[in-house]
Image (cartoon, helix red, strand yellow):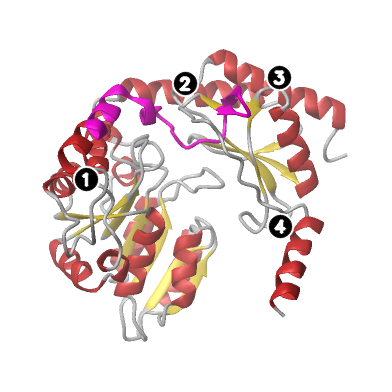
Amino acid sequence: MWQTFLSERLQQAHQQDAVRVREANGGADGRTLLINDRRVINFSGNDYLGLSRHPSVIRAWCDGTAQFGVGSGGSGHVTGYTTAHQSLEQMLAGWLGFDRAILFVSGFSANQAVITALMQAGDHLICDKLAHASIMEAAMHSPAEFTRFHHNDTAHLSTRLSRTQHNSGKTLVITEGIFSMDGDTAPLSEIRTLTQQHNSWLMVDDAHGIGVCGTEGKGSCDAAGIRPDIQVVTFGKAVGVSGAAVLCNAQTADYLTQYARHLIYSTTFPAAQACALHAAIQEIQRGDHLREQLADNIRIFRQQAAHLPLQLLPSSSAIQPLIAGDNTTALALSHYLQARGLWVKAIRPPTVPPGTARLRITITSAHQKADITLLTEALDAFCCQYRPGE
């Protein structure tokens, strides 16, 4: 039975050109990737500001290791919570304008922790249709009533909220600041107004906004001029490290400390990592030049790619999705680019909707204009040779 189940599912993935492959590399930075002993230009990473290799961040991690060791030794509720973690939480809360910040080992666990701990039977959970898998999985398993609203459609959200108006229970609306696969931005100001009108809470996952937009890189919520009830920020994208934090008021933080199982029963990430994160946030705060360079690179790419016959989704973020349509074309395009020293991975269903397989091209501040030109010329050459869509 087990062998049959596994064999059938794997065969199905192969038949649909949907097999996922992990390819070991020798290290990456904001611009390049070493793979198979070959240095290629990396257009698939999320190191938007190139901070993963920043000397001050590396130095802080090394100094933290010398002081605290390489592991935390336990849950934060036992021995894992150090003065380095505490200092980072206080820094984040003050910087982003919240009472408290609580650190988590990943954005996935942070999203799951909030939903699992806060939502109960009789509550209402309303999520953008394209919200991250971590949000959707927790929502589907929640005892709360779960509905979705059309992507970035505030009129549909208003309808969903109106249906909860006379019901008992709490209502939580969840969206993202910048969406991970489409690269577009949520209408946060309008969504915030709606949640306030309906006495609901708003949670924003700003994994791809923190560091790259807003004053001092404070993210999408700052750029939109709002403060949600709960904001989740992750550290594996523009921050250049790993981990996540939940920002909220003091009472909610106290509640999560008592009831968030993903927090209570997980080993805290190393104190040295907290030291590195502290240094990375400092670089973000004074990193206007990096954000300006990123914006310039995005503008250059969109100008050069505008003539391509493939659909380039409207996005002003570092995430630039180029729609190939079917899995076979997306894979062929990815392999074509890789053969020319350009690392761009194909993204296929179920990560994206059927018929929208794509290249998720990511632009960073570390890319050079020549890198972007090389990419767009290769894309043009592929389209001329294979004529996708005809």
The residue tagged 1 is 271
User: Residue sitting at 30 percent across and 78 percent down?
Assistant: 170
Nearer the N terminus, badge 3 or badge 2? Answer: 2
In x, y percent, where is residue 146?
46, 76
Question: In the image, which is nearer the foreground, mark 4 or mark 2?
Answer: 4
User: Residue sitting at 28 percent across and 29 percent down?
Assistant: 57
The residue tagged 2 is 296
Q: Secondary structure at mark 3?
A: helix
Q: Are marks 3 and 4 in contact (CB under 8 Å)?
A: no
Part of the protein shown in magenta: 34-62
In x, y percent, where is residue 223?
32, 40
Question: In the image, which is nearer the foreground, mark 4 or mark 1?
Answer: 1
Up the image or down, 389 lies above or below 11; here it is above
What kind of residue is marked 3? Glu
The residue tagged 4 is 354
Quadrant position of residue 175: bottom left
What kind of residue is marked 2? Asp
| Image quadrant containing the N terminus | bottom right
Q: CA distance from mark 4 to mark 2?
A: 32 Å
Would residue 321 appear left or right of 61 to someone viewing this image? right
Nearer the N terminus, badge 3 or badge 4? Answer: 4
In x, y percent, where is residue 316?
49, 34
Q: Secondary structure at mark 2?
A: helix
User: Residue sitting at 75 percent across and 74 percent down?
Assistant: 4
Q: Secondary structure at mark 4?
A: loop
Q: Which mark is residue 377?
A: 3
Nearer the N terminus, badge 4 or badge 1? Answer: 1
